[in-house]
Image (cartoon, rainbow, N blue to C red):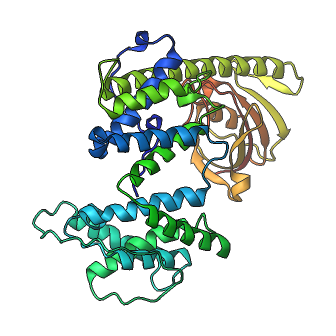
Amino acid sequence: MKKIILSILLFSALSATSIAADFASQQDSVNYAVGFINGWQVSERHNLIATDKKAQEVFLSAISSTFYATEQPTEIKRATQEITVIFQDQTELGLAQIKAWYYNQNLAWQGLINGLYGDTLWAFEDAMTFFQTNYMADVNNDSLPVAKQAKPKVTCPKAVKQVKLLSRNDSLNYAFGLLNGSQLAESAVDAKQKQQAIQLFNANLKAYSKYSKFENIGTTIGSALKKQIGQNFIGIEGLGIDYEKFAMGVAAGMLHDTTATYNANSAEMYLNELVAKYQQRKAEENSRVARLEGEQFLAENAKRPEVKVLPSGLQYEIINEGNGQKHPEATSRVKVHYEGSLIDGTIFDSSYQRGEPITFGLNQVISGWTEGVQLMTQGAKYKLYIPYNLAYGERGAGEIIPPYSTLIFVVELLEIED
């Protein structure tokens, strides 16, 4: 199921160029660029919009009316409109746009209703596997004969009905409907909502024209843009929506009008450059703050009488002394229980929560652990305060541990294995 969404979600990693000077402000240029890319993408996928003024009017009007509407379309209304367009589009090029697949609307719509109500004839996973396997086998097979597509006028069935699947083509159409209906069931969860969906389908089918797809795309774009209000547009702090500039960009992109400023490629490059620079600045600021907070935390923590500070900067606190005489060496394998947290108290790892201790070599972990655990004997329980340079350093550890993070570990040494 293909969707047109705001291009801020579709950026590719392109090289950078600067075009912000073409506008009075960065906010103007961003709104125009995002609009331009959306308009360009729609015209690239639908040739009619470049030449048909009615298609252009329907598309632009749907964006505007949705964006300015007091209430946004309900999820069921949006979904049924989109599915109607998708189902009707199959009559042009065949099922799933494979010209060799004959589109049987009646089977597809019955499959949708059966899927909506939870048909047990065919499990969702099995139908998905069947459809995907056949799609991958035929999508690029140009040797298949082209099927002559019929355009029957159908209505959406109102109830579940068992069907006979007499051929692979029957099964493909039924699976196509079943998969869409099963997804719709996530929005239409009770009997009243399912009946509402069926009524909307039939209303959409009755009113359907070649322009309906442009109304649906415009509604999707307008709704996506509306959701950005009050947020940081394209993720940049302080950047907001300017609908006038966005709409100007959509109109220009739709007509491939590059006289005013730029084409789709340069618009994407500009936005990529802007987002990359912002993210870099944000990461640098976050790292600076994390490093400073860690240093301040350790400085205050060192003032507590129960905390001991080693020359390396590692701090530790004895919760329980061990009952053994032997200390592990840097190459020893040890069995421990532990819990790791950031200085704000966020727990990022815990063998206690998993209910199972872990065994590892002390030369396989961060240096703060290697040094700290060697201070312990079997049965000891220490609290280690590890500065960033003895932990995961300037890079952090994925999304769990940010760069320059000071870490706190409660470590219980259960056994020294060798």
Q: Is residue 24 left or right of residue 100?
A: right
Residue drawn at x 70%, y 16% is: 292
Q: Is residue 347 left or right of residue 55?
A: right
Front residue of this view, candidates 153 and 160: 153
Asked if residue 312 shows in the view, the reply is: no
In this view of the protein, which residue sits in the foreground, 254 or 393?
254
Residue at left 54%, top 83%? Answer: 159
- Position of 339 relative to 76 (above/below): above
Looking at the picture, how far across and down is residue 9, in whole percent? Answer: 46, 38
Q: Is 334 drawn above or below residue 158 in the view shown?
A: above
In depth, the one of 154 and 350 nearer the eye is: 154
Location of the N terminus by quadrant is: bottom left
Q: Measuring 30% from the left and 22% from the top, which residue is drawn there?
A: 258
Residue nearest the observer in this picture, 169 or 346: 169
Residue at the far right in the pictured view: 305
Image: 178 above or below 273? below
159 sits to left or right of 298: left
Tell me what residue is drawn at x 81 percent, y 32 percent.
317
Percent across and percent down for residue 103 are 29, 72
Give coordinates of residue 288: x percent, y percent: 63, 17
Q: Position of residue 175 (x, y in %)?
A: 39, 75
Q: Residue furthest left?
A: 143
For the image, the number of numbered tags is 0
Residue 49 in sight from this viewpoint:
yes
- Above or below for 239 versus 152: above
Residue 316 appears in which quarter of the rendering? Answer: top right
